[in-house]
Amino acid sequence: MSAKTKMRIKKNDKVIVVTGKDKGKVAEVTKVIPQKNRVIVAGINMVSKHQRPNAQNQKGSIIRKEASLDYSNVMIYSEKESKGVRLGIKEKKDKKVVRVCRKTGEEF
């Protein structure tokens, strides 16, 4: 397992996929798993899970659901620039810490 790093991506952030089969797609983060450095993004990295028949589900079925992505494969999406941006951290005068775009200074 990789070393734990400080993740700057949070739940409900709009991200763009940088690599993989869904490269270029923009979607929202639904879950963050910081222990494994992974994120789950709505509608991205869909996998098929075969469900066996059981008492509740008499027939079996194939369920499509999102699998997790490594957080390094997504970037925060900037509406202003219409592309992925790198994040930095900036402390405001009132001691509040905010995430900002390194290039433009836009806050997230």
Image (cartoon, rainbow, N blue to C red):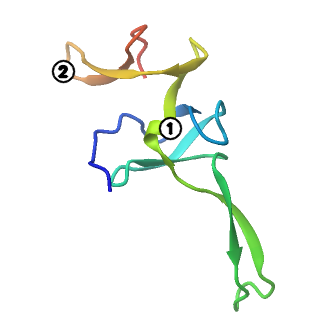
Tell me which amino acid carries mark 1: Asn
Report if the CB atoms under discs 2 and 1 are less than 8 Å apart.
no
Residue marked by disc 2 = 95
Across the whole image, how many numbered discs are drawn on residues?
A: 2
Label located before the other in sequence (2 or 1) = 1
Q: Which residue shows up at 61% across the image and 41% down it?
A: 20
Q: Position of residue 54 (x, y in %)?
A: 70, 89
Q: Residues within 10 Å of mark 1 (few under 14, many from 20)?
A: some
What residue does disc 1 label?
73
Kindly identify the residue that appears in the image at 64 percent across and 45 percent down. Answer: 44
Of circles 2 and 1, the one toward us is: 1
On screen, 8 above or below 36?
Answer: above
* Residue 13 can be seen in this image: no
> In the rendered image, which quarter contains the N terminus?
bottom left
Q: Residues within 10 Å of mark 2 (few under 14, many from 20)?
A: few
- Residue 66 in the image: x percent, y percent? 62, 55
Q: Residue at x 49, y 30 (%)?
A: 75
Q: Quadrant of residue 51?
A: bottom right
